[in-house]
Image: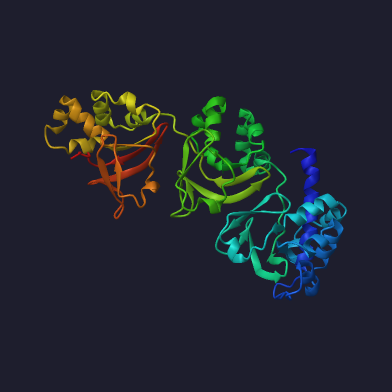
């Protein structure tokens, strides 16, 4: 962390303290009712409990801004929120007008956003220029719950909060490096030079594994990654997504592409998961993005569909693909979705059926292509879908009423990601009409 960053941190806290004390003078049990002709500043004055806020606004030259024009939405910290900041911070802010202005404007949004308006968004951009993450349900701002909402003024609305909101002052890598839980991640970013990349304009979203997540990798695997900058770079970029993706943006999202080009899958049905990792914490803000904390290291695919199937023990399928001369096809760019029968599935075919197929290449090719769909179709994409056209030209039926069934076959393992598509394992062979 640079000396400049260190010197700015107390200033930011001080500014935050100024704003918080201003709002904190409001008793939690007191309801402020704005008169129809009162602007935001007048509401604060009429309440008689926002003297610090008014002082801070005057010091920053913002009183006239919030007295007219608008409309504005103001997030107002309580006295207790300001009291929780280190002593002396408020004095420091009041002595540093630039820092004071940044913190005050980080609590103000252009436009009148009521609690119901905020419930429908994942973030808002403040007058300071940076964003606040919004969580649905009870209105939660950067993890802080609004304790009193919709105090109306004639030029906007005030929401009371119990903590001071501090604008992020560090980029994504520096934010991670400043957290002791991410020491291995910070080391890996530095070793690959990605700390400089992810310090750029962005914005970026990082699913950040903790040190415990890295320690859970087999020791030989972790050592091999740290000794191979190319492989380590791919792994790290598999945790990075272009743009700011807040937790509220993940609702209804099945997958997203990472900076290395391979997808991440999301499942919010029981907690929140990305691939097979649990999301432990969300919406850690940085100046150029957002971090979500996860409990496993995400490993990108390294093999195509055919090699993935071979390594997983699909020997009969691999033999059939070779006999039909489809190996090169399914090792192509794709992407493809393959419904892959197990060896046991092939073994349940009537006696002599598999041998007959292996001797009739046209029929074998038709059967195999009947298991392949163009494009990358994850299990989460199947909702509301009743059929899909295969590469054989015939359609398969899809039924989600009891698990996932493709024709009469049951999907027993889903979403095995390969470099050129995805595999779903099925328990019987699909036979075209």
- Specify whether 224 is left or right of 381: right
Query: 268 or 55, which is in the foreground?
Result: 55
At x 76%, y 37%, the residue is 2
Where residue 188 sits, quadrant-wise, is top right
In the rendered image, the residue lying farthest to the left is 351
Q: How many marks?
A: 0
Where residue 116 sits, quadrant-wise, is bottom right
- Where is residue 404 shown, x and y percent of the image? 31, 49
At x 70%, y 66%, the residue is 158
Judge whether 120 appears above or below 32 on screen: above
Query: 150 or 172, which is in the foreground?
Result: 150
- Where is residue 96 shown, x and y percent of the image? 86, 51
Q: Is residue 76 visible?
A: yes
- Specify whether 323 is left or right of 284: left
Where residue 241 sits, quadrant-wise, is top right
Question: Which quarter of the figure is the C terminus placed in?
Answer: top left
In the rendered image, the residue lying farthest to the right is 95
Query: 132 or 269, which is in the foreground?
Result: 132
At x 42%, y 31%, the residue is 419
Q: Is residue 209 visible?
A: no
């Amino acid at each position: 962390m640079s000396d400049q960053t260190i010197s700015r941190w107390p200033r930011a806290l001080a500014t935050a303290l100024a704003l918080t004390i201003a709002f904190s003078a409001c008793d939690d049990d007191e309801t402020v009712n704005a008169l129809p002709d009162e602007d935001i500043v007048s509401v604060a004055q009429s309440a008689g409990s926002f003297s610090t806020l008014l002082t801070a606004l005057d010091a920053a030259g913002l009183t006239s801004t919030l007295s007219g024009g608008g409309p504005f939405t103001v997030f107002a910290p309580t006295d207790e929120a300001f009291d929780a900041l280190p002593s002396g911070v408020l004095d420091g802010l009041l002595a540093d007008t630039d820092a004071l202005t940044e913190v005050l404007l980080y609590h103000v949004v252009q436009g009148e956003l009521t609690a119901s308006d905020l419930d429908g968004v994942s973030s808002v951009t403040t007058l300071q220029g940076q964003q606040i993450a919004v969580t649905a349900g009870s209105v939660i701002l950067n993890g802080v719950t609004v304790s009193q909402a919709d105090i109306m003024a004639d030029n906007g609305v005030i929401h009371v909060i119990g903590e001071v909101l501090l604008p992020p002052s560090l980029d994504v890598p520096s934010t991670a490096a400043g957290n002791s839980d991410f020491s291995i991640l910070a080391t890996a970013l530095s070793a690959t030079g990605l700390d400089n990349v992810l310090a750029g304009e962005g914005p970026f979203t990082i699913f950040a594994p903790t040190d415990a997540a890295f320690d859970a990798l087999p020791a030989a695997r972790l050592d091999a990654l740290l000794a191979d900058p190319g492989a380590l770079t791919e792994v790290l970029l598999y945790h990075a997504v272009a743009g700011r993706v807040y937790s509220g943006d993940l609702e209804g999202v099945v997958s997203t592409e990472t900076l290395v080009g391979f997808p991440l899958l999301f499942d919010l049905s029981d907690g929140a998961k990305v691939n097979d990792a649990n999301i432990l914490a969300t919406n850690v803000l940085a100046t150029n993005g957002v971090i979500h904390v996860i409990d496993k290291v995400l490993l990108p695919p390294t093999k195509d569909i055919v090699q993935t199937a071979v390594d997983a023990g699909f020997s009969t399928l691999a033999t059939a693909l070779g006999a039909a001369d489809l190996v090169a096809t399914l090792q192509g760019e794709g992407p493809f979705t393959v419904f892959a029968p197990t060896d046991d599935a092939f073994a349940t075919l009537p006696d002599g059926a598999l041998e007959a197929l292996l001797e009739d290449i046209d029929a074998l090719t038709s059967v195999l292509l009947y298991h392949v769909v163009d494009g990358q179709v994850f299990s989460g994409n199947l909702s509301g879908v009743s059929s899909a056209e295969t590469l054989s030209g015939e359609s398969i039926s899809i039924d989600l009423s009891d698990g996932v069934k493709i024709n009469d076959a049951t999907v027993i393992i889903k979403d095995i990601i390969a470099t050129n598509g995805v595999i779903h394992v099925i328990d019987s062979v699909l036979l075209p009409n």
